[in-house]
Amino acid sequence: MLSENLKHFRKAKGLSQEELAIKLHIVRQTVSKWEKGLSVPDSGMLIRLAEALDTSVTELLGETAGSESSSDESAELKAIAAKLELLNEQFAARCERQRKLWRAVFVLLGAAALLVLLYQLIEWFSYQAAMERIWADMTIIGGNDGPTNILCGSTLVQTGTWVLSVAAAIIAGIGIYKTRKK
């Protein structure tokens, strides 16, 4: 049923197996297996398949396109196909909610990482400005031209924070890219 309908709608659309596979981001052999009845697409792929062929999941799963069957069998197949289409729509909605949730998590992670990096950058610039003021007043230790100044300090820049912030920003960027709507 699905195998014949898939082949029928693909040919009616004027697509080769390769062209359909490219549209769905899969390999041609997968389309071939579906058309031979050796495997079936999962529910998410079934929705994408129906969209690529400009048809509904019900028609893909329904009675064989172009064939005649008894009315009882036809009504039963249509009922099953309608239930499957409803389940597929619910699955697609759940996947979309999960995609949006993960995207929000990655956006928040990226924003937090950028804020930490901005804070570290401001801290670094203020440290550099303070060092400029200190260097102007510094003398050589043991010199006889006035009091001896000893400078003890740190860079205030914590390398670990920089590394973690940059890594978090990169991870967030990748996550945002991967969770975009396709």
Image: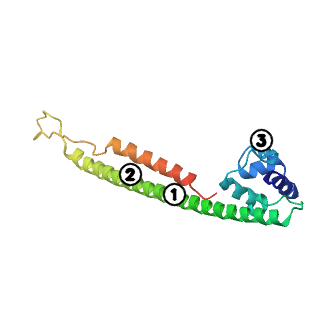
Sort mark 1 into few (<14), some (14-19) or many (20+) by Cα contacts within 10 Å.
many
- Looking at the image, the residue that sits furthest to the front is 72
Q: Quadrant of the N terminus?
A: bottom right
Q: Is residue 54 visible?
A: no
Nearest the eye: 168 or 63: 63
Q: CA distance from mark 1 to mark 3?
A: 32 Å
Q: Amino acid at mark 1?
A: Arg
**Residue at image coords 72%, 51%:** 24
Instruction: Find residue 82 and name its label.
Output: none
The residue tagged with tag 1: helix, strand or loop? helix
Q: Amino acid at mark 3?
A: Gln
Where residue 144 sits, quadrant-wise, is top left
Where residue 39 sits, quadrant-wise, is top right
The percent position of residue 44, horizontal first and vertical second, equals 66, 55
The percent position of residue 131, horizontal first and vertical second, equals 26, 47
Q: Is residue 164 left or right of residue 87?
A: left
The residue tagged with tag 2: helix, strand or loop? helix
Mark 1 against mark 3, which lies toward the viewer?
3
Indicate which disc, 1 or 2, sits on the residue closer to the N terminus. 1
The percent position of residue 132, horizontal first and vertical second, equals 27, 48
Nearest the eye: 127 or 24: 24
Label 3 sits on residue: 29
Proximity of marks 1 and 3: CB atoms separated by less than 8 Å: no
Q: Quadrant of the C terminus?
A: bottom right
Q: CA distance from mark 2 to mark 3?
A: 47 Å
Mark 1 against mark 2, which lies toward the viewer?
1
Instruction: Find residue 103 and name its label.
Output: 1
- Looking at the image, the residue that sits furthest to the top is 142
Indicate which disc, 1 or 3, sits on the residue closer to the N terminus. 3
Label 2 sits on residue: 117
